[in-house]
Image: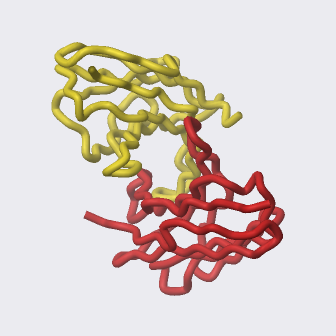
Amino acid sequence: GQQLNQSPQSMFIQEGEDVSMNCTSSSIFNTWLWYKQDPGEGPVLLIALYKAGELTSNGRLTAQFGITRKDSFLNISASIPSDVGIYFCAGQAGSQGNLIFGKGTKLSVKP
Amino acid sequence: DSGVTQTPKHLITATGQRVTLRCSPRSGDLSVYWYQQSLDQGLQFLIQYYNGEERAKGNILERFSAQQFPDLHSELNLSSLELGDSALYFCASSQPLLTEGQETQYFGPGTRLLVL
């Protein structure tokens, strides 16, 4: 089946640093979504991307839908302690609405 | 708060038992998706309902079934439970289909199932 490769698996950074994570796929996606999940909670939507090449920001977060439609990245600028959590990329392919998820990037921020 | 509600929050049961998980989508959303999150498999799509009809199936076991009712709430039924069914179960909902394959999904808080 389709798989998403998300990297890095984990990151340990200092407060104030910028963060970058990405997802790649062997197949084309119509939509890329980025979610954040806190322990014991459901994934919370951060950014949704619908067009190849699209660059979208949400506060300190910026994400891009790759031109090839097989990849996406998420950047977080000037990280703060509340950015701690697991970030997931997810994609939708073809006419199917179900999401295919990456394995997640666990972000730790040192004050 | 995503607007998607799930009950119960936690569920502890024994092997061989049957449980029902409930999900209420956001107001106006017609699609409900069920996902399973386990440590080894990550987030996996189980099944989708759209306006009461099954629309897509993923890695859902035959012991599992779901339905969506006229008021659009959905239930996921898990039967003959095994230890390996212990996981977080999430439902998500999305707006009516505007563009197929481009539905922004909002997740509920999940039900944590522990099978002993």
Write the residue at 44% across / 54% down: A99
Work out which residue is located at the far front of the displayed protein and give it.
A111
Answer with left or right where residue B97 lies relative to residue B40.
Answer: right
In-front residue for pair A94/B41: B41
Answer with left or right where residue B73 lies relative to residue B116.
Answer: right
Image position, residue B59 (x, y; %): 25, 45
Quadrant where the C terminus of chain A sits is bottom right
Write the residue at 34% across / 67% down: A3
Image position, residue A53 (x, y; %): 62, 82
Q: State whether residue B72 appears in this view.
A: no
Q: In this view, does A39 lie above or below A87?
A: above
Q: Colour of chain A?
A: red
Q: Colour of chain B?
A: yellow
Write the residue at 77% across / 55% down: A81
Answer with left or right where residue B72 lies relative to residue A21.
Answer: left
Q: In this view, does B48 lie above or below B68?
A: below
